[in-house]
Image (cartoon, rainbow, N blue to C red):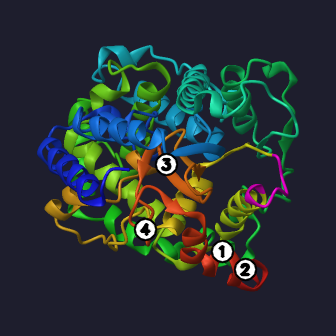
Amino acid sequence: MLSKTTWCAAIALASAASVATAAKFQLETAMATKTAYWDQSKDPLDVFDEFVEELEKEDEDKYSLVQIQSVVRHGTRYPTKSNIKEIDAFLKMLQTNYSSVIPSWMRTYQLPYNVSIEGILSSTGSTELKNYGQRMRLSVGKSIPVSYSSDKFVLQHTYKSRTKDSATSFASVFFQNAANVTYIEHPEGNDRLLRFFDECPRYTRDVADNENATSELTQYKSSSAMLKTVDILRSKLNLPSTAPLTVADVETAYSACSFDLALFHRKDNWCTIVTEDLVKAVEYAEDLETYYTESHGYKINYEIASVLLRDIVQYMTDFTQNKTSVVGNFRFAHGETTMPLMTLLGYVDRTKLRADFSPRAIEKRKFRTSRLALFMANLEFRLYQKKRNGEFYVQVRVNELPTEIPGCDDVFCKLSEVQDIWKTYLESYDFDKECSV
């Protein structure tokens, strides 16, 4: 394996290149949780790829891949019903009251989606999952069987159709006999594994349904930076200064642009009425909300993901003890599943996000949902066996990139070591107690 010094040097070089290119604004990768999946190994372009490839080739002869597990957010979906209604109401208001001045494309424009398809996986999302399945198949090679059998594989999803469709899209290319795959659907209201956020009354009371939990977001929405975006939008729409636009309208325009990009790869409609400053401001607002409802904002946000981590590690442990023959366990869920798990494992920056951050602090922040919680965000847990002595090692991949495991600080860590690092969540954490009200 590459020495830790060499690996760290590679990461440092990649980070330096990333900082150097950070100033280049990319609209497609600034849509917060509505960002379409993108290959982050290409940012920076060659540096990270070279070292990852070298690492994998060098370790290929030393380790055997024996099991792979993943937790995957569904692919790009259509807007939800409430989101569609907001966009449609905003559009109709503009067409009714300002048809003579708004951009020409908007005057007779109709939304390319309606509530009949709200929230379902789009064809773009299906393609994301198929491409992911192809990349994983190439990555695991012959180490993991190409044919599905129920004793070797588990594929599970939530009650939402977009997660089931994501699972079937993935399986359609990962397996040679995809028609034979059996899927496990966790029922609505009884899904502690993949929708733990729905099964924790204290989380619902203290965070999800508590406006005070996102007070920083509330403050930021009334900041000068956000109020400035109202003027920007009014100008882009050619509206008079008296037009009663709000911050909510700005968020609606941003959302409409994000779906134009994610679903149709279009910049010629909604995205023409947003600017870089507007997008950056709303993106930060979106990040504030996610930080305080799904990440480091409150411990309960991410500690409830312990039940999922425990299940993942149990499958690894059982395999090493010959208690299971499962070599692939693929879980398809939601952003509210992947973000808490990433946070729990230490892959999310802890810096507290605040409403009064300076423009520079906002620009330099490391917490970005457009990288962490985008459509099809994923975590992979790969179990390897060292050929020389039979010891078991774990590798975690975040959005397909091999990543150092916090507490071990290497990309290959002994299973026994990660069990010790995660011991509190694997053994001590009591979901029922912590979630009781």
Residue on which the image places disc 2? 435
**Residue 42, image x and y in percent?**
30, 33
Residue 431 screen position, x and y as percent? 74, 78
**Mark with earlier residue (4, 2):** 4
Q: Mark 4 = which residue?
A: 406
Q: Is residue 80 visible?
A: yes
Callout 4 amino acid: Pro
Identify residue for label 3.
397
Disc 3 crowd rating (10 Å Cα; few below 14, some 14-19, many 20+) is some
Which callout, 4 or 3, points at the residue further toward the start of the chain? 3
Badge nearest the viewer, 4 or 2? 4
Q: Which residue is mark 1?
A: 203
Pair 1/3: label in front:
3
Say whether disc 1 or disc 3 marks the residue closer to the N-terminus. Answer: 1
Labelled pair 4, 3 in contact (Cβ < 8 Å): no
Distance Cα–Cα, label 1 vs label 4: 26 Å
Asked if disc 1 and disc 4 are in contact, CB closer than 8 Å, the reply is no
Q: Give whichever of 108, 327 is nearer the camera.
A: 327
Q: Residues within 10 Å of mark 1 (few under 14, many from 20)?
A: many
Please, what secondary structure does the residue beneath circle 4 have?
Answer: loop
- Residue shown at 73%/23% (left/top)? 175
Q: Amino acid at mark 2?
A: Cys
Q: Secondary structure at mark 3?
A: strand
Q: Which residues are magenta?
A: 319-325
